[in-house]
Image (cartoon, rainbow, N blue to C red):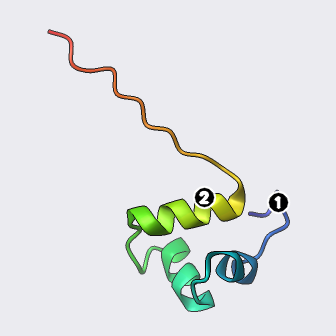
Amino acid sequence: MKEMDLRTSDIARTTGYSYQHIYDLLSGERRWNEDSINKVCAALGIKIEIKYGGCRK
């Protein structure tokens, strides 16, 4: 967020979450879920991609 010159309040405003909700997520006081991850990533302009290669025996 520092590199993008964004503050917690900016992320809160963009995601629709309260400042306290975002602060709690970032400080580890609140657990992330799929919805919060997606909203914060969208606010930051990043995409998380999970690739599964399968198990090899």
Q: Residue at x 59, y 65 (%)?
A: 40
Determine the residue positioned at 57% across, 80% down.
22
| Three-letter amino acid code of the residue under disc 1 | Met
- Say which element carries label 2: helix
Give x and y (percent) for residue 33. Answer: 38, 66
Dot label at residue 4: 1
Residue 2: where, in percent of width, then height?
79, 63
Q: Is residue 40 left or right of residue 25?
A: right
**SS at badge 1:** loop
Image position of 52 (left or right of 35): left
Q: Are marks 2 and 1 in contact (CB under 8 Å)?
A: no
**Quarter-of-image position of residue 51:** top left
- Give, as a three-letter code, the residue at label 2: Cys
Label 2 packing within 10 angstroms: few (<14), some (14-19), many (20+): some
In the rendered structure, find residue 41 and report the number of the disc placed on it: 2
Q: Whole-Å distance between the Cαs marked 2 and 1?
A: 13 Å
Mark 1, other Cα within 10 Å: few <14 / some 14–19 / many ≥20: few
Q: Residue furthest right?
A: 5
Dot placed on the residue nearer the N-terminal end, 2 or 1: 1
Give the foreground label among 2 and 1. 2
Q: Residue 34 at what x, y percent from top left?
A: 40, 62
Q: Residue at the spot x=74%, y=63% of the render?
A: 1
Counting the numbered discs, the total is 2
Q: Looking at the picture, does residue 50 appear above or below residue 47?
A: above
Percent x, y for residue 5? 85, 66
Quarter of the image containing the C terminus? top left
* 27 relative to 7 in the view: left or right: left
Give me the residue at 56% from left, 66% from top. Answer: 39
* Residue found farthest to the top: 57
